[in-house]
Amino acid sequence: MLLAQLLNGLILGTTYALIALGYTMVYGILGLINFAHGEIYMAGAFLGLFLTAGLKLPFLLAFPLATGGAAVLGVIVERVAYRPLRNSPRLSALISAIGVSIFLQNLTLTVAGPATRPFPRPFGIRVLTLPAGLSISSLQLFIISVAVLLMLGLDLLIRRTAIGRAMRATAQDLETARLMGINVDRVIALTFAIGSALGAAAGILIGLYFNSVDPLMGFQPGLKGFVAAVLGGIGNIPGAMLGGLLLGFAEVLGAVYFSQYRDAIAFAILIFILLVRPTGILGSTAQDKV
Amino acid sequence: MLQLIDVFTYYDDLAALRGISLEVRAGEMATLIGANGAGKTTTLKTICGLLRPRRGRIVFSGRDITGWRPEDIVRLGIALVPEGRRVFPQLTVWENLVLGATVRRDRAGVQRDLEQIFTHFPPLAERRKQLAGTLSGGEQQMLAIGRALMARPKLLLLDEPSMGLAPMVVEQIFAVIESINRAGTTILLVEQNADLALHIAHRGFVMETGRIVRSAPAAELLASEEVRRAHRIVWVRALRAY
């Protein structure tokens, strides 16, 4: 029973981690909390639903197309709602983010309607029995594998490629990055694209897992992804992964003991971490640029 | 090679440059000296595109680069070693240097230059996998200069390379700057330590509150009254800060 809960925690945790990555990458470069990120997650799920249930595309084709579509949406949001405000006070961009969030929710409500829809299963579900009385379904295995692969891919991109190097440089010192000849507008757009694709992937996986997609589905996971990013240390990529996993486990374990407070647990953790260690688990205090 | 013609730069409504004109000739080492707040850093930032002039023109190698973006200006051959070094502290020495070559496409050439910088600055070679933030001030300055050289600039702008460094280290850094110039790179050096700068430069420009009040061969300035006055202001400020 406990092991089954841990498996659930792992699934929730990896998806929270995917969402948290989008927050943390954007924050790392712009110092902005992209509160429209939960809606990108929702839009990803709807795009996935539209491509599989509407256009009858095979899931393995629909998944990259939907995440790609959400990446484009993320880039558009940055271009329209954040870039014009880049030199304005942070608060303006934050308000703009909330505006985008409300806009995307209502756009989806208008276009798709308020109903909750089922997500077609891409393959028959088999339950695999593992030793020690544990069992895992092929769907669970699939979700965890996809999430882990995406995170490994991101890690490689950030640490080993020229693009990743440019992204890290821009996050550390935007002005000096420009002096190197880095086109920081392109780096920022790319950051939004990658973060949005990961968030959308989480939306599709969760839509698939709970077999349900609706226009307001992004709100709670959006907030929890944010909590996970803060827990791990906002701006820190391994921190977002760790924060997501910890939050997933904390939620399911907490729910075992106080089931009615399940959603409160994330926010209790947020308050606690802000009081005790505001920089998060892996976050460092601001680097001195001497 | 570089010409500024009646350039005005503002921070909001505050004029930091009030009609600067200067010319740096190919191959020479020029220096811009003056007290704190005279507009030296602003001048460099305007040249490399981080600040947009409100009036005036900037011409480099016969092309009008006024209002260009910094990334395009680097590509044309102007590199800045910024004030306070500004190495990327969480990237390794090697990564910092490679980023300096962002605008280049000749991989083999980049590799050669990298090796050359490691030969010239042995401490950087030893620490190539270390994070730049863990280097000493002098090593970081070497790295910042090496990083700028990786772009193969025709014109190198240096902003206060002596800042916060021990006298012996400053001597080393200035020897490096001299050798870069002798190897053919044109240099515009900004320094508060006017004495030091004028000793290695060919020509000097003296700045006061957003204007160039004098330009002359370095040797001439070294002897002159204005410089001593500017120098004294620096000393008073340094003492106050102390």
Image (cartoon, coloured by chain):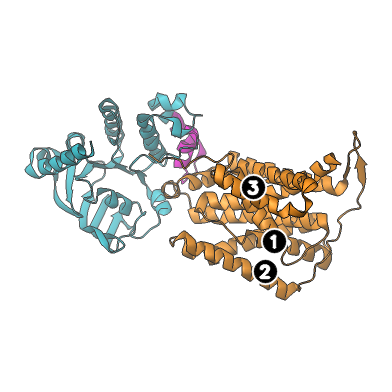
Q: Name the residue carrying label 1.
A: A218
Residue situated in front as seen by the camera: B113 or B236: B236
Q: Distance between the residues labelled 2 and 1?
A: 9 Å
The stretch of residues the image draws in magenta is B92-116
Residue B134 appears in view: yes
At label 2, which amino acid type do we have? Gln
Dividing the picture into quarters, in which one does residue B203 lie?
top left
At label 3, which amino acid type do we have? Ile
Question: Residue A283 at what x, y percent from top left?
Answer: 55, 41
Dividing the picture into quarters, in which one does residue A193 lie?
bottom right
Q: Name the residue carrying label 3.
A: A269
Question: Residue B202 at what x, y percent from top left?
Answer: 18, 39
Q: In this view, does A103 lie above or below B199?
A: below
Q: What chain letter is assigned to the residue under label 3? A: A
Contact, mark 2 vs mark 1 (Cβ under 8 Å)? yes
Q: Colour of chain A?
A: orange
